[in-house]
Amino acid sequence: MRIGIGYDIHKFGTNGMLVLGGVEFAGQPRLLGHSDGDAVMHAVADAILGAAALGDIGEHFPDTDDEWKDADSARILALAAGLAAEGAGLKPVNVDVNVIAERPRLGGKKKDMRARLAEILSLPLDSVSVKARTAEGLGPVGCGEAVEVQAVVLMEGVQQPVEKQTPSEIPNSRAP
């Protein structure tokens, strides 16, 4: 068993759709980033890579590579899980996520975010937690300028060969 910790922060832009945990938030500006800016997916991917001692998402999915420009971060997360399975023989057991933001309010979307993460990582829903926090008005997150995410992932050894998903097999749908 191994534990990985992931972290990401993105500031708000002005155009596009906000996506967190693979779920769209209508009426909210997109987070700035080379990919779709989904800080939840990035933090979880980073935690998985960390648990497997495979570096971080910047090493595997660099913002200097056009392949990842505006990419759906679900693909990044699925590929990170595949790297951990192939490179270190590890698969996720559970995921715990803190989303720190003044906006948007996650409310009922937390369940959709949990479901999307569980789908990508082939986990039961009760093995994925998404919690919402605020920064109590402090710093750029507290001023509503950014969203910050922390993730912890417990990984265990793969007992059977894991079927690797190719990027074209990864569901590319987001919950509205």
Image (cartoon, rainbow, N blue to C red):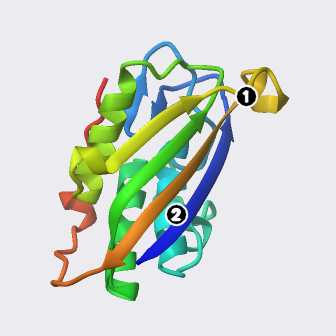
Instruction: Kindly identify which residue carries mark 1.
Output: 135
Taking depth in this image into account, of 121 and 78 the one nearest to the observer is 121
Q: In the image, 27: left or right of 87?
A: right
Query: In the picture, residue 100 is in which quadrant?
Result: top right
Residue 61 shows in the view: no
Residue 72 in the image: x percent, y percent? 40, 47
Taking depth in this image into account, of 130 and 172 the one nearest to the observer is 130
Which residue is painted at 84% across and 31% down in the image? 139
Residue type, label 1: Ala
In the figure, 167 relative to 89: above or below? above
Q: In the image, 39: left or right of 130?
A: right
- On the rendered image, what quadrant is the N terminus found in? bottom left
In the figure, 80 relative to 77: above or below? below
Query: In the picture, residue 10 is in which quadrant?
Result: top right
Precedes in sequence: disc 2 or disc 1: 2
The numbered mark at residue 47 is: 2
Which element carries disc 1, helix, strand or loop?
A: loop
In the figure, 15 relative to 73: above or below? above
Which element carries disc 2, helix, strand or loop?
A: helix
Which residue is painted at 64% across and 22% down in the image? 14
Which residue is painted at 39% across and 87% down in the image? 87
